[in-house]
Image (cartoon, rainbow, N blue to C red):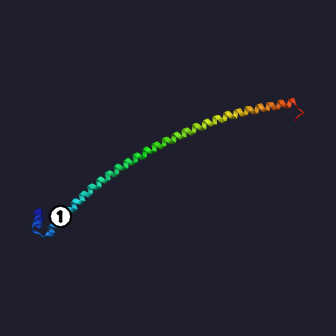
């Protein structure tokens, strides 16, 4: 009965009633369209956010690897330098011992020179 009353109002009513019905239909159609667009936009936002997170994680992994490589290289370089310094220190100790022996020999050979 309500359906026929609405049709009767549209057919026999003023043009404003038909326009009001159009506006009502247009409102609901637009609301449905806006809801669909909003859902699509939200899904697109999620997809873009996931891609951004993946790209960010990829960059993090790459930089972490670079940092690890640099730290390993730094450790190897420090170790190599320490070994070289130890060898030079040993050589300097040997030279110092030789010089002391030479000085002692000179003192023994020429006791009055000093």
| Residue 61 image position (x, y, % from top left) | 45, 42
Circle 1 crowding by C-alpha within 10 Å: few under 14, some 14–19, many from 20: few
| Residue 11 image position (x, y, % from top left) | 10, 66
The quadrant holding residue 84 is top right
Q: Locate residue 69 relative to residue 78 in the image: left or right.
A: left
Q: Can you say whether 104 is above or below 71 in the image?
A: above
Q: Locate residue 112 relative to residue 2 in the image: left or right.
A: right
The secondary structure type at the circle numbered 1 is: helix
Query: Furthest residue to the right?
Result: 112
Q: Residue at x 62, y 37 (%)?
A: 81
Report the quarter where the N terminus lies. Answer: bottom left
Q: Residue at x 54, y 40 (%)?
A: 71
Q: Residue at x 43, y 45 (%)?
A: 57
Q: Locate residue 63 relative to residue 75 in the image: left or right.
A: left
The quadrant holding residue 78 is top right
Residue carrying label 1: 22
């Amino acid at each position: 009965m309500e359906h026929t009353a609405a049709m009767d109002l549209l057919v026999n009513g003023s043009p404003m009633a038909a326009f009001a019905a159009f506006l009502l239909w247009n409102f609901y159609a637009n609301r449905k369209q806006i809801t669909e667009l909003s859902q699509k936009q939200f899904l697109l936002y999620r997809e873009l956010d996931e891609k951004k997170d993946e790209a960010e994680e990829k960059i993090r992994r790459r930089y972490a690897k670079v940092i690890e490589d640099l730290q390993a290289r730094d450790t190897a370089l420090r170790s190599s330098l320490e070994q070289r310094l130890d060898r030079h220190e040993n050589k300097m100790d040997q030279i110092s011992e030789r010089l002391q022996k030479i000085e002692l020999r000179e003192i023994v050979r020429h006791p009055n020179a000093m």
